[in-house]
Each structure stands twice: as structure tokens, then as C-alpha cells.
Image: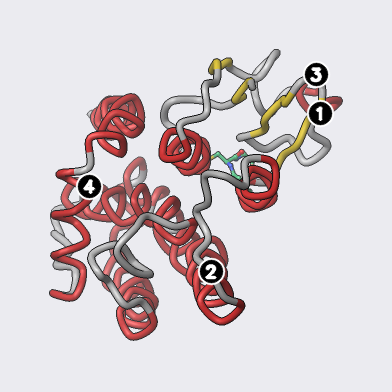
Amino acid sequence: MILYGLPVSTYTAKVRLALCWRGIAFEEREPPGGYRSLAWQDVVPMGTIPAIDDQGFLLAESEAILEYLEERFSDRPLLPQGPQRRAQVRLLARMHDLHVEPKVRALFPLLRQPQERDQLPQLKAALLEKIAGLARTARPGPYLAGPEPTLADCGFAVTLPLAERVLNTLGSPLKLPGVFQPWLAALAADRIAQRALSSWSSATDAWLKAVQPQ
Ligand SMILES: N[C@@H](CCC(=O)N[C@@H](CS)C(=O)NCC(=O)O)C(=O)O
């Protein structure tokens, strides 16, 4: 199994975490030519990372990858049993991709362009609204959908710490709702998660340092 991605990429970290939680051996490579290159678009038409190569089968889009891994390695599930519990996990995973992560990404331009920082209160409020929606939907126990990690945790384990770091850098710290505290503690104590996210964590710190205007 090859994982194509970059250390600083949120969605690469999401898939890396799923691979590590499942105990799947993989090799990590940067996309040939860079992820915005024409060479990479020949491989992944949308030009995004991550993608995986499983013995010649190439697949992009993190959620499609996670669902593929679920079927391919069915002995190590990250979806619970029962249609309703599985649907709840998928709902949370889509809340990550469609609602919460885009509001974190919307903060990125403010890092580089101080003149845009008057938009911070509005952008932060929009993010907080989505996080409040997540808090009302998730049932941390301590993972977002119960006692074990699921597909729902893979994106949020990257994006919520990223939101905290970005807002810290912007001088407006994020206070996550209390319902997430047991989840954050479980992740901090989860050695697989910590190992899986360590390259993302240091690349993100370096990126946040580098994008600060001089
Ligand atoms: N929906 C995609 C999103 C992936 C994504 O946005 N990846 C970023 C890096 S974290 C990227 O490739 N951005 C470049 C672009 O969109 O052109 C997925 O889940 O894989």
C-alpha cells in the first residue's frame, strides 16, 4: 500500500490515521510532480491529495479511501455494527468534510494577510457554529461515536487541533466545547494516533511559523 500525500496535508493525515488505526503497513510518497502539477492530474484528475495505490489500484478522495479500506480490510473495522450506528459515523464524517473543515480552511488567508484579519470575528463565529453542531451530534465515549475509534474520528483528530493552532496563531484562541475534552484526552493517550499524527503536527507547526508575515 502506498499513501500519496504531504506531511502538512489535513486529508493525508486523516487517511494516515485510518491506516495506522487499522494496522495496515504502508509506504508514504509525495505526489510525483507535486499535487497541483499536470503530472499528478494525470493520476488524480482533481489534482488533490491524498490518494492510495493498493497493488496498482489507485484511489483518491479521503472518504472513498476510508470506505474502501473498510471493505478491503474487513477484519479491522472502523465502522461499528448495525445500520444506524454506521450511518451515525458516516454522518459525522461528512460533517467533517462538508461543514467543519472548510470553515477552518477559510481562516488560512488571514495567516498570510494581516489586512484581512478584520474578517476574523465573522469567520471564527462561522466555525464555532459548525463546532457547536458537531457537539450536539457526536456522543463522545470517549471517541466521537463510542468507545473505539471510528471513521468519524479520523478527520476531526486533525482538523480540531488544526483549528486550535490556527486561531492561536491569529491571537484568538479557540475554546472547544467541554464535550470534546474526554475525546481530546483519549487522543492524547492514544499512542497509535500520536504516532500517526506526529509528522502532520511538526509540519503544521513549521507551516504556521513560515506563513506569519515578517
Ligand atoms: N475532498 C478531498 C479533499 C482533499 C484536499 O482538499 N486536499 C488538499 C490538501 S489537504 C489539496 O489537495 N488541495 C489542493 C487543491 O485542492 O487543489 C479529500 O477528501 O480527499
Q: Earlier in the sequence, mark 3 or mark 2?
A: 3
What residue sits 81% from the left and 21% below the top?
56
Q: Earlier in the sequence, mark 3 or mark 4?
A: 3
Question: Which quadrant would residue 94 be assigned to in this image?
Answer: bottom right
What residue sits 36% from the left and 76% below the top?
138
Q: Residue at the bottom extreme?
A: 136
The mark lying in front, picked from 2 and 1, is 2
Task: Indicate the amino acid at tag 4.
Answer: Arg
What residue sits 43% from the left and 39% below the top?
17
The mark lying in front, picked from 3 and 1, is 1
Question: Which quadrant would residue 53 be assigned to in this image?
Answer: top right
Q: Nearer the viewer, residue 88 or 169?
A: 88
> What residue did someone put label 1 on?
57
> What residue did someone put label 2 on?
81
- Is 137 above or below relative to 212? below
Q: Nearer the viewer, residue 103 or 140?
A: 140
Left or right side of 119 for 55:
right
Q: Nearer the viewer, residue 138 or 208?
A: 138
